[in-house]
Image (tube, helix red, strand yellow):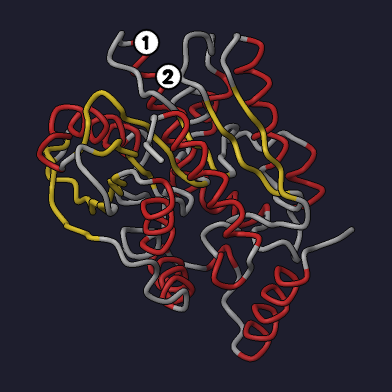
Amino acid sequence: MGLDAEVQTFIDDQVKAAEADPPPPVSEQSPRYGRDNYRSIADALGEGEPVETSDGELHGPAGPIGYRAYKPAGTEPFPVLVYYHGGGWVVGDLETHDHLCRMLCSRSGCIVVSIDYRLAPEHRFPAAVDDALAAYQWVLEHAASLDGDPGRVAVGGDSAGGNLAAVVCLLVRDQQGRLPDFQLLLYPGTDMTMSYPSVEELGSEGYLITREQMEWFADHYVPDHQQRTDPRASPLFAASHESLPPALVISAEFDPLKDEAAAYVEKLRAARVDATLSEYSGAVHAFIQLAPFMSIGYRGADEAAAALRTALDVPG
């Protein structure tokens, strides 16, 4: 069927903008360039859905970690979603994912705590993992101070953030800690070796993210190729996927990461974990984040919110 019409329009507009103002080759782009470009796209998303927000800092392994808490309407205590933003572990921040977090909060009835973990190359692997785990543990201990329910806590993220959410579940299980009640993985990266066919088939120009860009991210985050099979970098390579939380994995038909997302669901199912794969026809990577430009993204947000409501027993 091809790309969704609104997705195609968005991509066409991106191509026209690049033709009018050509970006430097990917290999020559600096992290600062990537962050500024990513922020400019996020700025175009608009203000987002009205929910109460508060910014703060939590104690991390290398110093304070910023967070933004989104609080829905209703009666507290609310279930909590600890959320890790995407951006290839190199770009992205609280602002780039503000619109997405507002959607998830208002539609799920959950508090969303967005984590501003450290980025590469200033802080390479496993700094983001260490921050992600510390943030989850902090939220468990301090949920009540956020008007949240420590007995109903999920983790989630998109792309690189989906990778971190999956890794947090593995680490908490291995440490015999209090597992999240649910994991929401939006088009997650699970295999940093980039060995699945969709990376080659869909990783050319035309589908929003390319293999060259994926390699640029990986080279900044995990430059040592031998470390890329470490389960903290590639959760697909974990020795066991047993006893992990139930999962919803959302992917896109024209996303280079779709094969590894599907492979992760198969790993979970083989380990008797309740895992659902939902692939959106005509969609591309980051389509939920880009919902203001493509209505299929709102459909994805609604599915994610409904899964959170069910998993965390949200009234109504």
- Quadrant of the image containing the C terminus: top left
Amino acid on which the number 1 mark rests in the picture: Asp
Tell me where residue 147 sits by quadrant: top left
Camera-side residue of 150 and 44: 150
* Image vertical order of residue 152 relative to residue 91, above or below: above
Q: Looking at the rendered structure, which numbered label has been put on residue 170?
A: 2
Decide: few, some or many residues near mark 2? Use Cα within 10 Å; few <14, some 14-19, many ≥20: many
Query: Please, what secondary structure does the residue beneath circle 1 have?
Result: helix
Decide: few, some or many residues near mark 1? Use Cα within 10 Å; few <14, some 14-19, many ≥20: few
Q: Residue at x 80, y 38 (%)?
A: 197
Query: Please, what secondary structure does the residue beneath circle 2 have?
Result: helix
Tell me where residue 213 sits by quadrant: bottom right
Amino acid on which the number 2 mark rests in the picture: Leu
Circles 1 and 2, Cβ within 8 Å, touching? The answer is yes
Q: Is residue 86 left or right of residue 13?
A: left
Q: Position of residue 101 (x, y in %)?
A: 38, 55
Q: Looking at the rendered structure, which numbered label has been put on residue 133?
A: none
Residue at numbered disc 1: 174
- Quadrant of the image containing the N terminus: bottom right
